[in-house]
Image (spheres, rainbow, N blue to C red):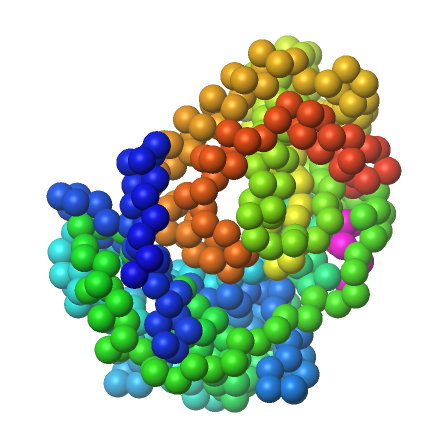
Amino acid sequence: MQIIDYPQIGEKLYSAVLPNGLEIRVVPKKDFATYYAAFATNYGGAHRRFSVDGRELDTPAGVAHFLEHKMFDMPNGDNALTVLTENGADPNAFTSSGMTCYYFQCTDKFEENLRMLLHFVSTPWFTEETVKKEQGIIGQEIRMGEDNPGIAIYYNLLELLYEHHPIRDRVAGTVESISEITAQTLYDCHKVFYAPSNMVLCVEGDVEPEDIVRIASEELSEELAPVPKANFGEAESLLPVSNLRRVQMEVSAPQFLIGAKLPSSRGGVESMRERITATLALRMLCGSSSTFYTRLYAEGLLNPSFDYEVDLSADTVTVILGGESKNPDKVLEEFNKEVKRIVAEGFDPGLFMRSKRASHGARLRGLEDFENVCVSLASGVFEGYCALDSFDILEAVELEDCRLFVQNNLSPERLAMSVIEPRK
């Protein structure tokens, strides 16, 4: 196995690639009681159109999420969630636009639980009857989401920003789209996307890295399958489709999200550098200690619900910031003024150094969270970088890099705003 030492953060990363193409990442934690394992596939809600073996395939919205729900059913009639829970583990799964991840945490019987995780994720079992039943369950989940202001405002923003990229569609799909899913659809997508060559296994705990390689080799197929190539459609303009959408829902106060799409992810270390630069620039521009936030907070235009993020998923990079405000239009106006000021004057060097230290500290605290480490490592494998390299990359970001990010990406014409107002 390849070993990378990170003395500045006190971590060692063991990496390996099995003959079947599976990527393995292990962070040993000697004398720790907790174990965490994440088994992820480079397959999310946006991977609807893809090619494999020269064939072009197009699937309904929601298949990746539907497949995640059904993977816990086992051919012998057991449910993997129940089996793992009875074995002392805390298991779950999630599907995002860019990946699906199955994971568990435990303090005992780690090898037994790991074998179960690898076994059920690699063993599809679907029938038309169980698929039809699940369509009703997920359909109800979708309808409940339509009444959720947080979900509505987020996807309204993505529809403002993206013209045709499937990231604008809900990961769960629609009631109509999931009605097209059959057992054969699930078998086909599992065969293509759940091949070890398209997956990664990340483990953290008091383990021997070689044991993880041995267990994975014993539990998974030896076949090296071709890696599917996603088709996200033609390149998007950097300008939004539209700049504003307002809807009314049952909320007590207006909510808003402001967003901008950045150039498509180039993958590799450069993608991580762009994300770190963007996050650092946003911390200085509108973070909790920024001039913008403290002034608008004092004026009653913002409250602690305000936050920001840089989302890198399915070949897209999206900047999103927002929260509650009695006057979202005024917030956007003041944000544009602050962007204009920063472009002209640049960031304060003292603020830059404080923000760098704060970001470094936040990343150090994140190392205490095994889930954060394993999921970040998995995402990094799919994007072509190592998440633990973020400390060195953060250190290399310069003041002017942050000003140029603001100048190049946050001008008024690049922004869109999604607003939900109380129903009149």
Please state the horizontal and vertical placement of residue 222, each as a whole percent of the image: 34, 83
Q: Quadrant of residue 235?
A: bottom right
Which one is in front, 318 or 204? 204
For image coordinates 27% across by 75% down, the residue present is 217
Assign the N terminus to one quadrant of the image: bottom left
The x, y position of residue 236, in whole percent, is: 79, 57
* Residue plotted at (52% across, 85% down): 188
Whether residue 423 is visible, yes or no, is no
Q: Is residue 345 left or right of residue 203?
A: right
Answer yes or no: is residue 32 visible: yes
Q: Which residues are magenta?
A: 159-164
Relative to 275, residue 326 above or below? above
Q: Residue at x 62, y 17 (%)?
A: 290
253 vs 101, nearest the viewer? 101
Is 89 within the magenta? no
From the top left corner, tell me how far across and down residue 117 is, in percent. Answer: 29, 68
- Check the picture and name the quadrant holding the C terminus: top right
User: Does the magenta-highlighted stretch encompass residue 161?
Assistant: yes
